Image (tube, helix red, strand yellow):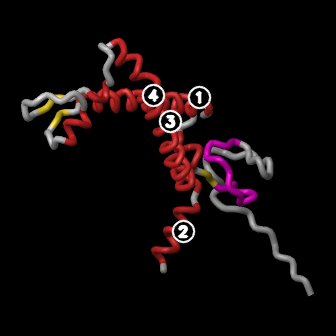
Amino acid sequence: MGLFHEFRQFTVRGSAVDMGVGVVLGAAFSSFVDSLVRDILLPPIGLLYSKMNIENLHISLSGKTYPSLTEAKEAGAITINYGLFISTSIRFVIILFVVFLVVRQMNRWKKPHQHPSDSMTNKECPYCCLSIPNRAVICPNCSSSLEKTQPAERTTYPRLKIK
């Protein structure tokens, strides 16, 4: 039961949910880029390259020539499909460029001179005992001034007895 509980906590945590959303958006974006390359970018390139479909470019290792890749596959020929490799490489470069743009924008939104681990770690205010950012100088909850070194011992107040 401990493994199931730990897995449930992992899936509820924000990073796992973000990763799931990223995978779904990545799949949708991949099909968009696939259509962009196959239907918009490659036909004009094929027109410039003597009116042929770039995805049909192949080398038959059996020595026979086939007019298209589908006919070579139907004949059972072993081929090197360099046209498919070119279109896959174009898709990869487009996706890589978009990921670069997203990461670049995320880095711009991040506060300057802030290390990612600093934004994720917190410390406890010695006066109000609430969690505050690690680099805080003044507690946002109780407005007490924090020193670099925490006070050695917290002052205790006498307990009131209620009858």
- Pointer 3 or 2: first along the chain: 2
- Residue at label 1? 108
- Give the alpha-carbon distance from disc 1 to disc 3, as whole Å: 26 Å
- Residue at label 2? 8
Q: How packed is label 2: few (under 14 Cα within 10 Å), some, or many (20 or more)?
A: few
Q: Position of residue 125 (x, y in %)?
A: 69, 54
- Give the alpha-carbon distance from disc 4 to disc 2, as whole Å: 42 Å
| Circle 1 or circle 3, nearest the eye | 3
- Give the alpha-carbon distance from disc 1 to disc 4, as whole Å: 34 Å
Quarter of the image with the C terminus in it: bottom right
Q: Position of residue 78 (x, y in %)?
A: 14, 39
- Give the alpha-carbon distance from disc 4 to disc 3, as whole Å: 10 Å
| Circle 4 or circle 3, nearest the eye | 4
- Residue at label 4? 39
Q: Are marks 4 and 2 in contact (CB under 8 Å)?
A: no
- Residue at label 3? 32
User: Please, what is the three-letter code of the amino acid marked with disc 1?
Assistant: Arg
User: Please, what is the three-letter code of the amino acid marked with disc 2?
Assistant: Arg
Instruction: Give, as a single range, the part of the protein colored magenta.
Output: 124-137
Q: How packed is label 4: few (under 14 Cα within 10 Å), some, or many (20 or more)?
A: few
SS label for mark 4: helix
Q: Work out which residue is located at the far bottom of the displayed protein and give it.
A: 163
Q: How packed is label 3: few (under 14 Cα within 10 Å), some, or many (20 or more)?
A: few
Q: Position of residue 56 (x, y in %)?
A: 28, 29
Q: Are marks 4 and 3 in contact (CB under 8 Å)?
A: no
SS label for mark 2: helix
